[in-house]
Amino acid sequence: MTIDFDKLPEQLMDHFKGGEGTVQARMHMDAMGKIARLTLPAGASIGLHTHETSAEMIYVLSGSGIVLEDNADDPAPMVPGTCHYCPQGHTHSLINNGTEPLVVLAVIPELG
């Protein structure tokens, strides 16, 4: 299966998971999970949330930001080419603290 994100409808998610600003998403979903290209404008974030029934892998395509993991005091930098993995049962948040849009590929398999 080939997914062309440019042909998928854009979804605008205000304060996604309790975060700041509006996240733009183009997403493929089925019973096995989600594959999405997400764009976080400068200053936008995905709020702190726990993956109860899924995991998530986030790969940075462009821009920069930070990810907060579980109760870690030190945020991890996210730049093009870096990947963040949030296992099932863990908590994370993604923040665009840069000046350009942060564009990521997110893979969220549903684990049950």
Image (spheres, helix red, strand yellow):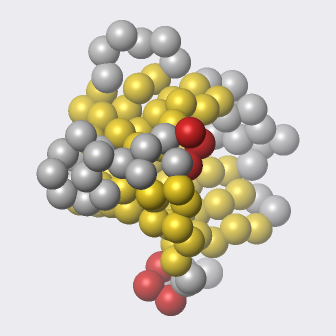
The residue lying toward the viewer, choosing from 100 and 62, is: 100
Q: Residue furthest left?
A: 99
Q: Residue at the spot x=74%, y=32% of the render?
A: 52
Q: Residue at the spot x=36%, y=48% of the render?
A: 44
Q: Is residue 66 left or right of residue 32?
A: left
Q: Where is residue 76 shown, x and y percent of the image?
A: 30, 27
- Looking at the image, can residue 89 be seen? yes
Q: Residue 17, located in which quarter of the rendered image?
A: top right
- Looking at the image, can residue 87 be seen? no
Quadrant the C terminus occupies: top right
The residue lying toward the viewer, choosing from 98 and 105, is: 98
Q: Is residue 102 left or right of residue 89?
A: left
Q: Residue 41, located in which quarter of the rendered image?
A: bottom left
Q: Residue furthest bottom?
A: 7
2 w.r.t. 66: above or below: below
Q: Where is residue 86 shown, x and y percent of the image?
A: 54, 33
Q: Where is residue 26 shown, x and y percent of the image?
A: 52, 72
Q: Residue at the spot x=56%, y=39% of the render?
A: 18
Quadrant the N terminus occupies: bottom right
Q: How many marks can you see?
A: 0
The residue lying toward the viewer, choosing from 6 and 45, is: 45
Q: Is residue 21 left or right of residue 52?
A: left
10 w.r.t. 93: above or below: below
Q: Residue at the spot x=25%, y=32% of the render?
A: 77
76 w.r.t. 64: above or below: above
